Image (tube, rainbow, N blue to C red):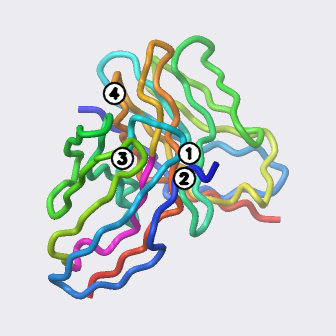
Amino acid sequence: AQSVAQPEDQVNVAEGNPLTVKCTYSVSGNPYLFWYVQYPNRGLQFLLKYITGDNLVKGSYGFEAEFNKSQTSFHLKKPSALVSDSALYFCAVNYNTDKLIFGTGTRLQVFP
Amino acid sequence: NAGVTQTPKFQVLKTGQSMTLQCAQDMNHEYMSWYRQDPGMGLRLIHYSVGAGITDQGEVPNGYNVSRSTTEDFPLRLLSAAPSQTSVYFCASSTPTGTSGSNEQFFGPGTRLTVL
C-alpha cells in the first residue's frame, strides 16, 4: 500500500537559516510526489511536484525539494527561511491515479 | 476565475441531522475530491469523482454520500451526523493524470463542521 511519512510534527528554525522538512514515501513503482502548504484557516496551496527527470525540483516562494529514490525521500528545503514561511506543510504521493495520499503534516515555525 | 469554492464556511449540527456541503469549481476540471482534515492525521480522502456521473469511495467514505451531475459541482452529503464527523472538510479539483504525469490539485477554503 502507498504511504507517506513526515517524521517531524514540528520544525523550528531561525529566520535566515536554511530549513528542511522531511518526507519519506512507500510505493510500488514510480511515484508522483507533491508538497503543499497550508496557512492558518486556509485551504492547501500547491508548492511543487516531482514527476520524473531532474531530482531537484524548484517550486513557489523559493522552495525546492530533492527526490532521492534510494532513500525513498522527498525532503522540502529552502536556503533562507522567512517568518512568513511559518505554516503547515504536507507531503503527498500518488501513483498512476489522481488520488493523493497525504502525510500527517509538519508545522514549520520560523522565529525572528 | 473563482477557483474552488465551498459553502458554508462554518456549520454546527446536532447528532442525527443531515446536511450538504457544497463545492463548485470553474476551471473545467474533470477530477474532484473531498477530504477531511483532523489533527495529527493529515488529509484523508472521503470520495472522489473522475467526471460527471462517476464517483467512487476513498479511504473514509462511511457516513457520506456524493453525486456528480455536472462538471462544476460536487456536493458532499452527511446522512446522519455523528460527533466523529467533526472535522474540517476540503474539496479539491484537478485535471486528470495524463501522459505528462499527475497534476496538482486546487483546494477550496474549507468547511469547519462541528457535530454536537
Residue to which mark 3 is pinned: B33
Q: Circle 1: is it few (<14), some (14-19), or many (20+) Cα within 10 Å?
A: many
Q: Are marks 4 and 3 on the same chain?
A: no
Q: CA distance from mark 2 to mark 1?
A: 6 Å
Q: Tell me the number on the disc at residue B91.
A: none
Labels 3, 2: front one: 3
Tag 1, which secondary structure? strand
Question: Which amino acid type corresponds to the residue marked 1 in the rendered image?
Answer: Tyr
Image location of residue A26, percent across then percent down: 34, 30
Rendered residue at 58%/11% (across/down): A53
On screen, residue A48 versus residue B6, left or right, reads: right
Give the residue pinned by disc 4: A97
Q: Earlier in the sequence, mark 1 or mark 4?
A: 1
The residue mark sitting in front, 1 or 4, is 4
For badge 2, the amino acid type reads Leu
Q: Are marks 3 and 1 on the same chain?
A: no
Q: Which type of secondary structure does the marked residue at label 3 adopt?
A: strand
Give me the C-alpha separation between circle 1 and circle 4.
18 Å
Q: What's the residue at 50%, 52% (across, down)?
A: A8
Amino acid type assigned to the residue bearing label 4 in the image: Thr
- Between residue A81 and residue B65, name the one nearer to us: B65
Residue, disc 1:
A36
Residue B116 horizontal/vertical position (percent): 26, 88
Local secondary structure at mark 4: loop
Disc 1 with disc 4 on a shared chain: yes
Q: Are marks 4 and 3 in contact (CB under 8 Å)?
A: no
Q: Secondary structure at mark 2?
A: strand
Question: What range is drawn magenta here?
Answer: B83-92
* Residue under label 2: A44
Quarter assignment of residue B84 = bottom left
What crowding class fits label 2: few (fewer than 14 Cα within 10 Å), some (14-19), or many (20 or more)?
Answer: many
